[in-house]
Image (cartoon, rainbow, N blue to C red):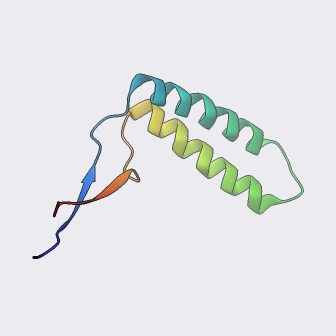
Amino acid sequence: MSDRIVITTRRQLGFGERALSVVLGLGLAAVAARPRPNMALSAIALAVGSYLAWRGATGRDPMDVSVMDDGA
């Protein structure tokens, strides 16, 4: 009996998930753009906010990978 692992990616995000990603991403990027004492956290927040906004605008998420066991 050999177990096989299949890695699949979702094709498109739903409308609600896209809208939430855009709103949260733009909000996080706007907050991160303000001057803060810790520049590293601001840079990380800006990167994550930009990624979320891009994810919501395009409807694709290359980091959304599901690992499923195909041996059932």
Camera-side residue of 71 and 9: 71
In this rendering, is residue 50 above or below 39?
A: above
Residue drawn at x 38%, y 28% is: 14
Q: In the rendered view, does 27 fall on the left or right side of 25?
A: right
Marks counted in the figure total 0
Residue 56: image location, x then y, percent: 47, 33
Camera-side residue of 35 and 71: 71
Residue 35: image location, x then y, percent: 85, 47
Residue drawn at x 60%, y 37% is: 25
Instruction: Please tell me in which quadrant of the rendered image residue 49 appears.
Output: top right
Q: In the rendered view, does 37 fall on the left or right side of 32?
A: right
Instruction: Please tell me in which quadrant of the rendered image residue 70 appears.
Output: bottom left
- Residue extending farthest to the bottom is 1
Residue 44: image location, x then y, percent: 67, 56
Residue drawn at x 9%, y 76% is: 1
In this rendering, is residue 10 above or below 17?
A: below
In this rendering, is residue 64 above or below 15?
A: below
Q: In the rendered view, does 33 fall on the left or right side of 53?
A: right
Q: Quadrant of the C terminus?
A: bottom left
- Residue extending farthest to the left is 1
Residue 68: image location, x then y, percent: 27, 58
Residue drawn at x 41%, y 23% is: 15
Instruction: Please tell me in which quadrant of the rendered image residue 5 appears.
Output: bottom left
Q: In the rendered view, does 60 fall on the left or right side of 28?
A: left
